[in-house]
Image: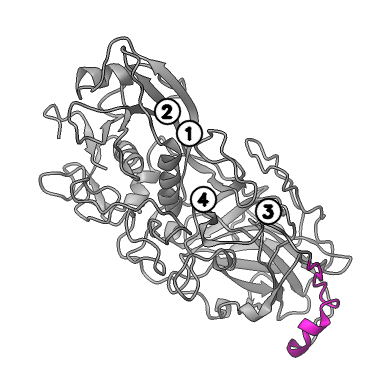
């Protein structure tokens, strides 16, 4: 620790004990069997199919914890794109300006920004926050040389090359510090106006940037600290992202889908055999006060976390702008939940609104061109859900991260009046979704209503436990009326249900564990 106690030094997700989320009996449904999988694209639900309207604001129907979209651009915004799976971006976000520092002798830092923002998003997505490198510059300083001291030179670096936006976090990539083992150095925003920011050395660990960002966000008026005698700025739990680098267990270089060593969900257990480090599990408190608060809530209270609720337009069309039910956010935070309380997301027959996609880049994925559903009732729906690269930690029965389970991580009920609900029945899963252009909307599931004339659909994330991480992203719901065959003849009656017989082979579109 710097003797001036001006910096938060990191050498390198919020939850206490989460109570079980108890779903109403009507909403319980078995895991969707792989025997329902059908290769190819979905077929139309007869000529009268159309979108249901996502119910956003209402005294009765609340809605999602957050909204977001899937973008082809990597959140580091360095030109990296993925036009197959993309990257999930949240409407709760932290914008970062990164400066690569060149000293007076022309010596430059050599950061691994893509790794830093990969890990930061993988960790913070579990609490609903995206971390975006909104600005990136290289700046030469005539008044410092490497290695930087942690006092005057660090101040000089952080006093310059700053974002004009006061809600942007200033991050400085430096080659090294006079303390040779120092990986990161944070100047807290409440104590260093005009020269606050994060410093990341070339020798940083995989999660150093995410750790230092945590210090920055937790520093608010009053300052959130940990009950950790002798070091109240660091968590006492070694698996917590905010533990000191001398004790913190670090994630490996392998990320989700690559060796299953991803940071785990922000509960007190890993999902399957995915990684078990870089989570938030130690409560924090305002310095000098005894009232504990969850890390998730404290992080969401930071003025640097910018938030928007786009539920008026997201969730209405298959266009990669989604709405999310997130049990962790429901149970551990009020600030990070668009609609406080444990609730469902609800769709109904009504007008739909197109998204402007402002600031989004969906590449050539397009939209499924349908209008609103105009019938008086429906008996079948197709659920267009999302496979989220960062947010989803759902696994298969062997404990490996699974894009299929990440897409089918929800429970669904139908209603004729918005009051009485009964569970739907999955009758088919279209492996290739509705378009070959993207894998994000694969595994579109078709559900049969217990009512012949349903008017409402509600969705909740599959409860925490077993295969699922407690959050689900839904792009749109398509409704229709069809003649539903008996269960034993479903696969033989594909035409009656509009099942796609588009068994076109797609080259280079196979999901492999190492794709993400």
Q: Earlier in the sequence, mark 2 or mark 4?
A: 2
Q: Is residue 514 left or right of residue 145?
A: right
Q: Residue at x 30, y 61 (%)?
A: 16
Magenta-colored segment: predominant secondary structure: loop
The one of 435 and 166 positioned closer to us in this rendering? 435
The secondary element bearing badge 3 is classed as loop
- Residue at image mark 3: 438
Q: Position of residue 324 (x, y in %)?
A: 56, 56
Q: Earlier in the sequence, mark 3 or mark 2?
A: 2
Locate the N terminus and report the quarter of the image it occupies.
top left
User: In the rendered view, how is the structure colored?
Assistant: one colour
Q: Which residues are magenta?
A: 486-503
The one of 127 and 352 positioned closer to us in this rendering? 127
Q: Which mark is residue 338?
A: 4
Q: CA distance from mark 2 to mark 4?
A: 29 Å
Q: Is residue 167 visible?
A: no
The correct choice, above or below, for 346 with respect to 86 in the image is below
- Residue at image mark 1: 133
- Residue at image mark 2: 98
Q: Is residue 337 visible?
A: yes
């Amino acid at each position: 620790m710097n003797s001036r106690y001006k910096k938060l030094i990191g050498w390198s997700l919020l939850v206490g004990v989460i109570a079980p989320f108890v779903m109403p009996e009507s909403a319980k449904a078995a895991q969707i069997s792989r025997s329902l999988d059908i290769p190819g694209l979905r077929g139309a639900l007869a000529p009268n199919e159309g979108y249901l309207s996502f119910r956003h604001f209402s005294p009765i129907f609340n809605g999602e914890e957050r909204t977001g979209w899937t973008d082809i651009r990597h959140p580091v915004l360095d030109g990296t794109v993925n036009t197959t799976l993309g990257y999930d971006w949240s409407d709760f976000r932290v914008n970062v300006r990164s400066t690569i520092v060149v000293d007076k002798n022309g010596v430059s830092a050599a950061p691994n920004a893509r790794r830093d923002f990969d890990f930061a998003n993988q960790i913070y997505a579990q609490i609903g926050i995206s971390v975006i490198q909104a600005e990136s510059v290289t700046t030469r300083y005539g008044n410092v040389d490497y290695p930087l001291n942690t006092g005057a030179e660090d101040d000089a670096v952080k006093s310059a090359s700053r974002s004009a936006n006061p809600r942007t976090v200033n991050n400085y990539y430096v080659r090294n510090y006079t303390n040779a083992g120092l990986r990161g150095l944070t100047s807290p925003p409440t104590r260093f106006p005009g020269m606050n920011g994060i410093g990341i050395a070339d020798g940083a660990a995989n999660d150093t940037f995410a750790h230092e960002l945590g210090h920055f966000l937790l520093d608010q008026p009053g300052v959130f600290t940990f009950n950790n005698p002798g070091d109240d700025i660091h968590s006492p739990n070694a698996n917590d992202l905010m533990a000191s680098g001398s004790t913190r267990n670090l994630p490996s270089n392998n990320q989700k889908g690559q060796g299953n060593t991803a940071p785990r969900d922000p509960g007190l257990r890993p999902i399957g055999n995915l990684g078990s480090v870089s989570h938030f599990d130690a409560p924090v408190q305002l310095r000098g006060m005894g009232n504990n608060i969850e890390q998730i809530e404290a992080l969401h209270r930071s003025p640097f976390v910018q938030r928007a609720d786009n539920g008026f337009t997201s969730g209405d069309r298959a266009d990669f702008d989604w709405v999310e039910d997130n049990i962790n956010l429901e149970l551990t935070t009020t600030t990070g939940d668009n609609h406080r309380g444990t609730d469902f997301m609800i769709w109904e027959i009504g007008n739909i609104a197109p998204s402007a996609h402002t600031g989004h880049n969906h590449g050539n994925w397009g939209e499924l061109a349908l209008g609103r559903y105009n019938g008086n009732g429906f008996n079948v729906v197709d659920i267009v859900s999302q496979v989220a690269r960062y947010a989803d930690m759902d696994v298969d029965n062997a404990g490996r991260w699974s894009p299929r389970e990440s897409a089918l991580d929800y429970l669904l009920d139908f209603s004729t009046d918005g009051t009485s609900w009964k569970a739907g029945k999955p009758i088919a899963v279209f492996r290739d979704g509705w378009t070959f252009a993207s894998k994000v909307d694969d595994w579109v599931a078709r559900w049969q209503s217990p009512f012949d004339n349903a008017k409402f659909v509600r969705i909740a994330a599959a409860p925490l436990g077993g295969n699922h991480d407690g959050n689900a992203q839904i792009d749109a719901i398509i409704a229709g009326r069809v003649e539903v065959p008996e269960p034993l003849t479903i696969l033989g009656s594909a035409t009656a249900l509009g099942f796609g017989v588009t068994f076109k082979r797609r080259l280079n579109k196979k999901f492999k564990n190492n794709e993400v």
